[in-house]
Image (cartoon, rainbow, N blue to C red):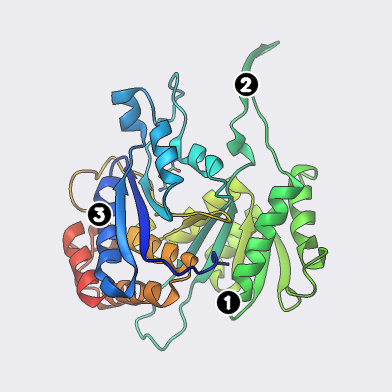
Amino acid sequence: RGMATQARSTLKVALLPADGIGREVIPAARAALEALGSDLPRLEFVDLLAGFELFTRAGTALPEATIEALREQDCALFGAVSSPSKSVFGYSSPIVALRKELDLYANIRPVLSVSKDPSQKPDVDLVVVRENTECLYVKQEVSEIGEHGRVAKATRLITERASTRIGKMACEIALQRPRKRVTIIHKSNVLSVTDGLFRETVRRVPSLPGVNGKYDSIQIGEQIVDSAVYRLFREPHIFDVMVAPNLYGDILSDAAAALVGSLGLVPSVNAGDTFVMGEPVHGSAPDIAGKSIANPLASIRSAALMLRHLGYGKQAERIENAVDDVIRDGTVLTPDLGGKSKTEEVTAEVLKRV
Ligand code: GGG
């Protein structure tokens, strides 16, 4: 489901590289957009600040100015963020906040393998549609002293509204795919109230008033999350669109990335009804940051996915074909894919083909 295509004379793109390798891969995504030349409206880029490193320097991870500037743009590209595993006073994850602030309620993560022969179907071709605003990510955690020591509690929020809109998004995506299959991922055999509501609500989407049979061609199934992971590893080809609450969706998409060779290949968009933000699924990878060996392909593919969502499908395809071609060729790849090339060399190889 893309946003309505509008005739634009300019396309305003915010760039938020944020932390670590985000700063190395977002320039590659920008270059891929620029390589499309006159096939796109005139591009206007604005660089915006966010991230943990910014917090350590300036005391804020997401300045108000960044949010205000984002509201003036058509779309955005976000790199990666390195939130620490231990709570830091005054810090909160900027990406989680941004998704909520801009109501980017769907995190759409296609995972696609590239077959050697372009005429052959890929072994893995699925999309994880992750609910992006609730579940445990409402971050309502408390710690208290109980009878037997410290007790930590978290609220897990699932609402009918959010489950309905993510269900609709999954159906819209499935409609555009040949297999038209949606699998609801849940654990309602244990969490019958929260996951039960998610499961029931998504199941009901095709029969909602106003849908009028639009989703009748879609086959809706379901899988308990643990068994879904097992089957994902053993028979990835059975999955088409997987729709999941926030945390399961996050974990599933990283797991699925293992099936296609590298997390460095998997793109995403954070999509709402009026705004879209591309974002590679990988994190900030502090262990390799600054070495120019980060894989730029997830970020470049995220730029393409963002374009597709904005209605520039033909332009997205030019980038996607170039990326597939570089992977298929296999001579210019970063170390995560067994290559020896630098980030800039892989980017240049893609740009040549765009
Ligand atoms: N681009 C995805 C990304 O940055 N992933 C790491 C992640 O999920 N971080 C959450 C956070 O650091 O707040």
What residue is shown with label 2? 142
Quarter of the rendering containing residue 114: bottom left
Q: Is residue 352 above or below residue 93?
A: below
What residue is shown with label 1? 177
Viewed as shown, does residue 212 lie left or right of 228? right
Q: CA distance from mark 1 to mark 3?
A: 31 Å
Q: Ligand 1 is in which quadrant of the figure?
A: top left
Q: Is residue 11 above or below residue 189?
A: below
Q: Nearer the viewer, residue 176 or 245?
A: 176
Q: Is residue 216 above or below residue 189?
A: below
Q: Position of residue 344 (x, y in %)?
A: 17, 59
- Name the kind of residue labelled 2 in the image: Val
Task: Please report the residue visible at 39 percent of the width from the left and 72 percent of the height from the top.
Answer: 316
Task: Please report the residue visible at 59 percent of the width from the left and 47 percent of the height from the top.
Answer: 246
Q: Residues within 10 Å of mark 2 (few under 14, many from 20)?
A: few
Q: Residues within 10 Å of mark 1 (few under 14, many from 20)?
A: some
Q: Position of residue 90 (x, y in %)?
A: 45, 20
Q: CA distance from mark 2 to mark 1?
A: 43 Å
Q: Position of residue 166 (x, y in %)?
A: 65, 56
Using the rendered image of the protein, determine whether residue 228 is visible from the camera's viewpoint: yes
What numbered label is drawn on residue 27? Answer: 3
Q: Is residue 154 above or below residue 265?
A: above
Q: Nearer the viewer, residue 110 or 167?
A: 167
Q: Nearer the viewer, mark 2 or mark 3?
A: 3
- Name the kind of residue labelled 1 in the image: Arg
Q: CA distance from mark 2 to mark 3?
A: 39 Å
